[in-house]
C-alpha cells in the first residue's frame, strides 16, 4: 500500500508560535513512518512557509526552502516559492494544520486548503472562524440555549469616543470582578481581571491593542474544566479534565511558565456533572459548526457546580502532555491512535464535501 502523504503545517505569526512547534514535534514523533510520508511545513514569524528536511526536528524546518500552496484545484502540492529554486513539488494527500491563533486557527489557512482541494484535519472555514471569535461564539451559544456567563461587547471606536460611557455601561450590567478579553485571541494574552472600577478603562484600552472588539464578561470563582471531542457523526466526548493553578486565574504565566499548574485527568467531579458537561460540549460543538475535533472549556462555579461554556478551541494544544490528548488517553485512546483517527476523519469529511454538486442540474 502506498504511504499517505501528510503535510504537517505549524508555527505561524502568533504568540502561540512556540506552542505550535511543541505540538508539531509530538505529532511528528507519533506519525507511523510505515503508513505516512510526512512533510514538515514551518510558518515563520513573517508568515513565510519553509519546507523542512525529513528526519530533522520540526524547529529545524524554519531554515528549509520557501514553498507555497497554490489555490489551484488538482495541483495538491507544495511548490517552490523562490525564483531559480529547483522545481520540486511535494504532493500532499492530507494536511494537519497545527497553527494556533490568527492566520491558522481562524479559518484563513482552512480557506487556502479548501481552494487547493486538500483534505485537512479539523474544523472548516466557518467553524474555525466562529470558534476563534469569543463574541460571535457567545451569541450562537446563547441562541442555542447553552449556558454562558453574562457579557457585553465593547468596540474600539466606542471606547475612543466615550470611554466613561463604556465603563458606565459595563458597571450597570455586570458586577466586579469582570474579565476583559480581546475577542479573537488565545493563551490569555490581553486578558485582564478587573476588580476595581478605576481599572476598567485601562484594561479596555489594553485589550483593544489586540483586537478592535472586546468582550467584557462576568467574573466568578470558577474551576477550569474541559472536555475533548472527536468525530463528526457521532461526536464522541472524553472524560473531563481540570486545570488547577496556584495563580489567581489561568493566565499566560500559568499556562506556559508556572510549573506548579496541575492538570487533573480525570477531573474530580461527580459522574452526573461529567455527563452533563459531555452532553453540553457536544451541543456547543454543533452550535459553533465544529468538525473533527475540539476542546470545550467550561467555567464551573466553585461553590454551586453551576457550569458555563467558556470557549471552544478548534485547534487545542497538542503536545503529548497537553490536555486534549491526555483526556483521550484517559478515555482509552492512545496518542498515535488519536492522530490516525483525525487523519481518517479529515479524509472522510473531504470525501463528503467533494460529492456536493457544483453545477446546476435540472431536477
Ligand atoms: N468570567 C470568568 N470568570 C472567572 N474566570 C475566568 C472568566 N473568564 C476567564 N477566566 C479565567 O481566565 C482564563 C482565560 O480565559 P479564556 O476566556 O479561556 O481565554 P483564552 O482564550 O486566552 O484561553 C480561563 O481559563 C479562566 O481561568
Ligand atoms: Mg481558554
Image: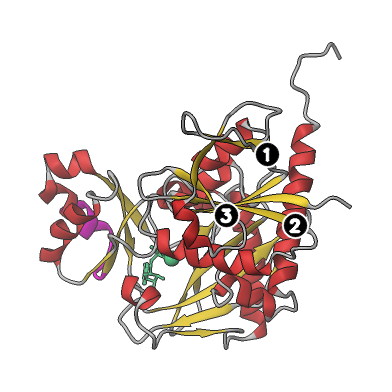
SS at badge 3: loop
Answer above or below: position of 309 versus 207.
below
Is residue 134 toward the left or the right of residue 206 in the image? right
N-term mark: 1 or 2: 2
Q: How far apart in space, not on screen, are marks 3 and 2 (Cα)?
A: 15 Å
Location of residue 117 with respect to 324 vertically, above or below: above
Query: Image quadrant of ligand 2?
Result: bottom left
Q: Quadrant of the C terminus?
A: top right
Local SS, label 2: strand
Q: Overall secondary structure of the magenta stretch? A: helix
Q: Of discs 1 and 2, which sits in the foreground?
A: 2
**Residue carrying label 2:** 36
Residue 292 location (% of width, % of height): 68, 54
Q: Is residue 301 left or right of residue 94?
A: left
Q: Nearer the viewer, residue 348 or 148?
A: 348
Q: Which residues are magenta?
A: 168-177
Task: Give the structural element (helix, strand or loop) at label 1.
Answer: loop
The numbered disc on residue 198 is: none
Q: Which residue is mark 3?
A: 53
Picture layout, residue 215 above or below residue 296:
above
Label whose residue precedes the other's in the sequence (3 or 2): 2
Mark 1 against mark 3, which lies toward the viewer? 3
Amino acid at each position: 500500500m502506498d504511504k499517505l502523504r501528510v503535510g504537517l503545517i505549524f508555527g505561524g505569526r502568533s504568540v502561540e508560535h512556540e506552542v505550535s512547534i511543541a505540538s508539531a514535534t509530538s505529532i511528528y514523533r507519533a506519525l507511523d513512518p510505515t503508513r505516512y510520508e510526512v512533510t514538515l511545513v514551518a510558518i515563520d514569524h513573517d508568515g513565510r512557509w519553509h519546507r523542512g528536511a525529513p528526519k530533522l526536528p520540526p524547529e529545524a524546518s524554519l531554515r528549509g526552502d520557501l514553498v507555497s500552496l497554490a489555490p489551484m484545484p488538482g495541483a495538491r502540492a507544495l511548490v517552490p516559492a523562490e525564483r531559480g529554486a529547483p522545481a520540486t513539488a511535494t504532493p500532499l494527500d492530507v494536511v494537519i494544520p497545527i497553527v494556533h491563533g490568527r492566520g491558522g486557527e481562524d479559518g484563513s489557512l482552512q480557506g487556502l486548503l479548501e481552494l487547493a482541494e486538500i483534505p485537512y484535519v479539523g474544523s472548516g472555514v466557518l467553524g474555525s472562524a466562529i470558534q476563534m471569535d469569543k463574541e460571535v461564539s457567545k451569541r450562537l451559544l446563547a441562541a442555542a440555549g447553552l449556558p454562558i456567563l453574562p457579557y457585553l461587547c465593547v468596540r474600539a471606536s466606542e471606547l475612543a469616543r466615550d470611554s466613561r460611557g463604556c465603563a458606565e455601561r459595563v458597571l450597570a450590567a455586570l458586577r466586579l470582578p469582570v474579565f476583559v478579553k480581546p475577542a479573537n485571541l488565545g493563551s490569555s494574552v490581553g486578558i485582564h481581571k478587573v476588580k476595581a472600577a478605576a481599572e476598567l478603562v485601562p484594561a479596555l484600552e489594553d485589550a483593544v491593542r489586540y483586537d478592535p472588539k472586546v468582550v467584557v464578561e462576568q467574573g466568578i470563582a470558577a474551576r477550569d474544566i474541559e472536555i475533548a471531542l472527536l468525530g463528526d457523526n457521532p461526536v464522541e466526548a472524553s472524560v473531563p479534565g481540570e486545570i488547577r493553578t496556584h495563580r489567581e486565574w489561568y493566565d499566560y504565566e500559568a499556562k506556559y511558565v508556572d510549573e506548579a499548574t496541575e492538570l487533573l485527568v480525570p477531573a474530580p467531579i461527580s459522574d452526573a456533572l461529567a455527563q452533563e458537561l459531555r452532553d453540553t460540549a457536544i451541543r456547543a460543538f454543533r452550535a459553533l459548526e465544529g468538525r473533527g475535533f475540539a476542546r470545550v472549556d467550561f467555567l464551573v462555579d466553585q461553590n454551586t457546580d453551576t457550569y458555563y461554556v467558556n470557549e471552544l478551541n478548534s485547534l487545542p494544544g497538542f503536545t503529548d502532555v497537553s490536555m486534549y490528548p491526555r483526556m483521550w488517553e484517559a478515555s482509552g485512546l492512545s496518542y498515535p491512535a488519536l492522530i490516525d483517527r483525525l487523519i481518517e476523519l479529515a479524509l472522510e469529511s473531504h470525501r463528503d464535501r467533494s460529492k456536493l454538486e457544483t453545477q446546476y442540474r435540472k431536477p
